[in-house]
Image (cartoon, helix red, strand yellow):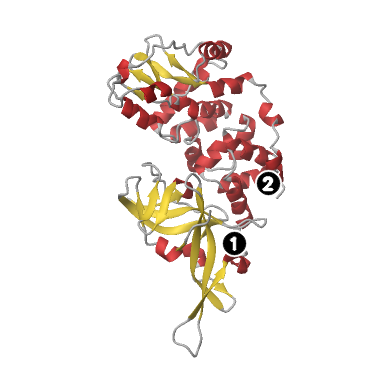
Amino acid sequence: MAGELIYAFRIMRLPLLDAGGSPIGKVDDIVVAPPVQGRQPRVLGFVATSQRRRIFVNAGRLSALDADGARLRSWDVDLNPFKPRVGEVLIGRDLIDKKVGDETVSDVALRSMGDARSQWWEPAKIRLAKRSTIRRRPSYRLVDFDDVPQLFASFAGAEVAAEVARLRDMHASDVATAVRQMPLERRKQLAAAMDDDRLADMLEELPEAEQLRIIEGLDTERLVNVLEEMEFDDLADLLAEMPGEQRTRVLEAMDDDDAETMRRLLSYSEGTAGHLLTPEIVILGPTSTVAEALAQVRDPDWLVSIAAQVFVVRPPFKPPTGTYLGVVHFQRLLREPPMAELTTCLVKEPTISPNMPEREVAERLASYNMLAVGVTDDAGRLLGAITVDDVLDRALPRDWRLRRRPSVHLREEVSG
């Protein structure tokens, strides 16, 4: 469903609001992907100033864009400095004041599209100004965006940026399938133009050998930013395939805590539970309440298999934790009073050793109908968990991703 128009000049004066509505910065510009193959251009995100830093806010992270400001869906803010990607167009920097024949672009109107669950913005109208030697003030006219296709013609890399915008609505596994059909050079161009989190999602759906080919042209800073967006178990698999010198360089450039975690995961033998586990799980203490647990699992960034249960431990609450006490499943949380403590409703489900063979891990998950199983050390400390999707990935033939084909719908999209 199309919404009302909102103009770029107005947007570029709005505050950036956190999920609670408090201002944390100001919107400076709007990043747009050019049109491709008859598709409309789309807003990729917004450049904002926050804490004296010029940052990028992905359009998908906004819950609202109106007269009050640009409001984030969650409390998380990526404070990495904004760096324009190949083919991206900034409305304020590149389009405003751009000449179109004997007229000049004076403003760009965006229209919200989609619904409450999935919303995005597209450039819809262009306000053109024309100056005359007779009149003191310019005359204005409003035209459809389709009437000025030449706006994007002069931007290098526009086709790549538009392709990235087209792929962003597809599931990561479908993106990987589509990208695998492209020449290696085009894959690298797309990787250079993708957002860090989107590129990380795609890499997780590719065999490690193809991952290495795609990322080989990225500088260390960009590479680390992308790798830190990957799930720990997928990242461990990729690092294990890297040449030793490259792996050392990446680990030294990573956040100290993340690097320590990765070194621990890499220490486990191939084919064992430790090689599959992820330390990124929902962990709380026994005196935490049901309401606190529900607030944690409500976070949309959690995988479904991770958010299905809360692991309860003694402090500390970061793996390796204190003593593992049990688990509370999501359905049980829904049946308990909000202020009930987790210790009153936890189940002491069995855990596994990090040295357990992968096949036995699969058998344990199947025997107990688990979506995830906790992994503990000899002292009973929780190291992380293994999810059923990761076990399934290992149970399938190693080349199953290579044999996967897109659906009929996707095949039509890829062909344009």
Residue at 50%, 33% in the rendered image: 230
Image position, residue 387 (x, y; %): 51, 22
C-alpha gap between disc 2 and disc 1: 24 Å
Image position, residue 402 (x, y; %): 69, 31
| Quadrant in which residue 212 is drawn | top right
Mark in the foreground, 2 or 1: 2
When the figure is inspected, residue 362 is found, relative to residue 204, above or below; the finding is: above
Q: Front-most of 11 and 25?
A: 11
Q: Can you see residue 412?
A: yes
Image position, residue 77 (x, y; %): 38, 44
Image position, residue 70 (x, y; %): 39, 53
Count the marks: how many? 2
When the figure is inspected, residue 389 is found, relative to residue 351, above or below; the finding is: below
- Hey, what amino acid is under mark 2? Glu
Residue at 38%, 41% in the rendered image: 76
The answer to which of marks 2 and 1 sits earlier in the sequence is 1
Asked if residue 256 lies left or right of residue 32, the reply is left
How crowded is the residue under tag 1: few (<14 C-alpha within 10 Å), some, or many (20+)?
some
State the residue position of label 2: 413
Asked if residue 315 lies left or right of residue 65, the reply is left
The secondary element bearing badge 2 is classed as: helix
- Hey, what amino acid is under mark 1? Phe
The secondary element bearing badge 1 is classed as: loop
State the residue position of label 1: 155
